[in-house]
């Protein structure tokens, strides 16, 4: 009888033991939360942790749904005076260790489910907070089809309830896996504008005149400005669907920053939206969302923008423009119904200024619909992603020009040839400049 006792006892112990996932993972997980800036109060699923970032919190793996969170979702809320309340949503994924239990041992697998040991969250969370001016929600999503981690960011405008929230869904490969620069540049600044929704601000316009993906372009460039170019969050002026007043304020602020830094500033300007030439003078204008194509001169003259950016000495000013100034556009130009096509006039550039433009002469600046970006912006970001910013201006321009010129013909059946314009002060050196140096 004794010879049967040991195996029987071992079998009973085996069956009664909790699963290996539960043993090794437990019902809780430690998560480290960091924020930029640090010192933010941390709330998890609506409960105050009474801790400030950076910090490590223990969260339950199995989470019941509530008014704040979904089933098996952690919602982190960060609050700091002078900054917008920021949310970070993390949906759990299935842990492989629990899968083994289900595959070989049914009872241990059920134990995993009961305590939540079959769920896994991010170990480290990093949240960038924005100064007061608009709510930002950062969310980590996991698709059920291929389990590829995607992110989306919701920008809630402060320009009134009539403006709907814009969702940056990050559906392009350049929106994900953005490299992070090992350093930040104290004297780097950026003005970033994405003008997409013209029809909501002008009742006589149809949605066809809107600029497809301009808000995606600006939102993605903002992330590259912070992560790849190393520009601190507080040094970025960011606008979506900007009116005349807001655009002029942004340009004026940029000029004042350059003046205040006494030649130390490196300023980056990015614009996606409509451009338009004056029919009489052929002067190119960038168009705020509240300016009609019938009155291009009510827009902002490109030469005036360049003049303000170079009024005071700076280390360098780099401008990226995903717009055309011929009267055409990604969908339909503001003057497309009248068939206007004008070769815009070029003005001489001053200071240490380099301008990357999406198209030449009478061409349109077109979308890359599969990637949900402008064609020019997509390849600009692609090169920054591939090189982590360690690229010369010459190599960057060569890559963008070559790829946009070819892909535009293949995809859009139209020519689009980006170009680079330089000031007299930068002509001899611009090609050797690097995005990060």
Image: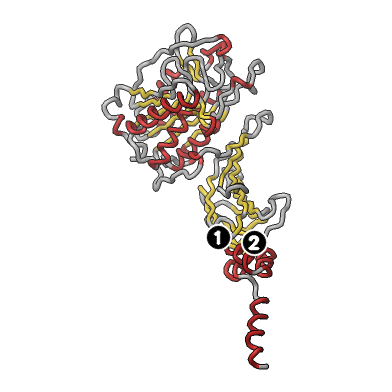
Query: Looking at this view, is 363 or 280 the one in front?
Result: 363
Q: How is the image coloured?
A: secondary structure
Q: What element does badge 2 sit on?
A: strand
In the picture of the structure, the residue carrying the numbered disc 2 is: 60
Residue 335 vertical placement versus 14 (above, below): above
Choose mark 1 or mark 2, whichever is in front: 2
In the picture of the structure, the residue carrying the numbered disc 1 is: 56
Image quadrant where residue 133 sits: top right
Residue 410 vertical placement versus 37 (above, below): above
Residue 306: percent from the left, percent from the top? Answer: 41, 22
Q: What element does badge 1 sit on?
A: strand
Q: Residues within 10 Å of mark 1 (few under 14, many from 20)?
A: some
Q: Residue at x 63, y 17 (%)?
A: 205
Outermost residue toward the left in this view: 428
Query: Looking at this view, is 55 or 170 the one in front?
Result: 170
Report whether 161 appears left or right of 256.
Answer: right
Q: Residues within 10 Å of mark 2 (few under 14, many from 20)?
A: many
Instruction: Classify the position of the C terminus by image quarter.
Output: top left
Residue 264 vertical placement versus 94 (above, below): above
Checking the image for residue 128, the label placed there is none
Q: Residue at x 62, y 55 (%)?
A: 92
Q: CA distance from mark 1 to mark 2?
A: 13 Å
Residue 1: percent from the left, percent from the top? Answer: 68, 93
Outermost residue toward the bottom in this view: 1
Residue 212: percent from the left, percent from the top? Answer: 56, 27
Report whether 253 appears left or right of 185.
Answer: right
């Amino acid at each position: 009888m004794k010879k049967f006792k040991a195996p029987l006892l071992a079998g009973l112990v085996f069956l009664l033991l909790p699963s290996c996932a539960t043993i090794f993972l437990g019902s809780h997980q430690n998560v480290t939360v960091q924020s930029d800036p640090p010192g933010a109060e941390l709330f998890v699923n609506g409960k105050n942790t009474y801790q400030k970032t950076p910090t490590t919190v223990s969260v339950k793996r199995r989470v019941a749904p509530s008014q704040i969170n979904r089933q098996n979702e952690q919602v982190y809320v960060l609050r700091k005076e002078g900054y917008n309340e920021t949310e970070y949503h993390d949906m759990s994924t299935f842990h492989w260790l629990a899968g083994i239990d289900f595959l070989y041992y049914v009872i241990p697998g059920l134990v995993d489910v009961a305590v939540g040991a079959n769920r896994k969250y991010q170990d480290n969370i990093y949240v960038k907070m924005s100064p007061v001016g608009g709510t930002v929600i950062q969310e980590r999503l996991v698709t059920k089809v291929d389990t590829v981690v995607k992110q989306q960011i919701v920008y809630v405008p402060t320009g009134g309830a009539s403006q709907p929230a814009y969702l940056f869904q990050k559906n392009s490969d350049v929106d994900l896996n953005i490299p992070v620069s090992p350093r930040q540049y104290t004297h780097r600044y950026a003005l970033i504008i994405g003008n997409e929704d013209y029809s909501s601000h002008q009742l006589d316009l149809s949605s066809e005149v809107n600029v497809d993906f301009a808000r995606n372009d600006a939102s993605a460039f903002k992330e590259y400005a912070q992560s790849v170019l190393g520009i601190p969050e507080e040094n970025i002026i960011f606008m979506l669907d900007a009116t005349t007043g807001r655009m002029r304020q942004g340009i004026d602020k940029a000029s004042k920053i350059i003046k205040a830094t006494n030649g130390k500033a490196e300023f980056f300007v990015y614009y996606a939206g409509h451009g338009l030439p004056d029919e009489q003078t052929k002067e190119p204008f960038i168009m705020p969302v509240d300016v009609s194509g019938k009155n291009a001169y009510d827009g902002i003259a490109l030469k005036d923008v360049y003049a303000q950016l170079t009024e005071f000495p700076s280390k360098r000013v780099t401008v990226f423009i995903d717009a055309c100034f011929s009267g055409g556009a990604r969908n339909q130009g503001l003057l497309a119904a009248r068939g206007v096509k004008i070769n815009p006039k070029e003005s001489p550039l001053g200071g240490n200024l380099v301008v990357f433009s999406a198209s030449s002469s009478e061409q349109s600046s077109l979308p890359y619909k599969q990637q949900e970006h402008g064609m020019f912006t997509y390849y600009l970001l692609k090169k920054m992603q591939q090189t982590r910013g360690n690229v010369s201006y010459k190599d960057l321009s060569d890559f963008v020009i070559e790829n946009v010129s070819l892909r535009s013909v293949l995809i859009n059946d139209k020519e689009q040839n980006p170009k680079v314009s330089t000031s007299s002060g930068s002509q001899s050196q611009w090609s050797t400049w690097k995005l990060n140096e």
